[in-house]
Amino acid sequence: MNQDIQTKRLQLREMQLEDAPALFEIWSDPDVTKFMNVDAFADVSQAEEMIAFLRSLSEQKRALRYTVWKAPTKEVIGSCGYNEIDVAQGKVEIGYEFAKEHWGHGYAPEAIDALMTDARDHLHVKRVEAKVERENINSIKVLQKLNFVYEREVREEENGKVTVLDVYVRDLRDA
């Protein structure tokens, strides 16, 4: 759907099945998956299934997920992307997660800033949303650093579990 995105330190490439072993290492860490809607992965086949699912959503132009690489070392450090693309409504919902050893180095804001530029320039959307659990203080700080503002609370149910999320938004018309 989209081409790779390059930043000063990162490369974002549409997720590929060959990324499964590296992403499994990240998605198998309970600290990383704590605020995701999945349990920590126990087997690389789960990462392969997740990637296949995300690629099918991309083919339908409903979502797009990138593997995030450190540009100089080609080390996979996380993933990010559009959990939902709604061009008709002019908005996308973003999501992201990074390997714990890379927290606090500014990679999440750098990747999300690149996503917002891509969303504005290539998807031509005007609004970016992120849904965050209130306890996910680090993620909230990342969003606030990028001028996202709290908009509302939503309740989502998945597999019988109800989660309360706060929706943060960023209007791209001011970017």
Image: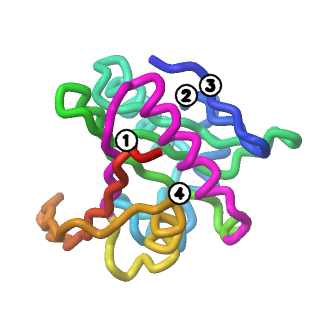
Report the disc number at residue 4. Answer: 3
Helix, strand, or loop for circle 4? Answer: strand
Q: Residue at x 54, y 49 (%)?
A: 112
Residue 123: x percent and y percent? 39, 25
Earlier residue among tags 1 and 4 = 4
Quadrant for the N terminus, please: top left
- Mark 4 = which residue? 97
The answer to whether residue 98 is left or right of residue 10 is left
Measured in 3D between alpha carbons, the distance from the residue under mark 4 to the one under mark 3, in whole angstroms, is 18 Å
Helix, strand, or loop for circle 1? Answer: helix
Which three-letter amino acid code belongs to the residue tagged 4? Answer: Glu
Q: Residue at x 50, y 20 (%)?
A: 2
- Mark 1 = which residue? 173
Q: Dot 1: few (<14), some (14–19), or many (≥20) neighbours within 10 Å? A: few
* Residue lying farthest to the front in this orientation: 174
- Mark 2 = which residue? 14
Q: Nearer the viewer, residue 43 or 18?
A: 18
Magenta residue span: 104-131
Give yes or no for contact between labels 3 and 2 (Cβ–Cβ under 8 Å). Answer: yes
Q: Residue at x 71, y 45 (%)?
A: 76
Helix, strand, or loop for circle 2? Answer: strand
Residue 19 position (above or below residue 102)? above
Give the main secondary structure of the magenta stretch. Answer: helix
Residue 19: x percent and y percent? 63, 35
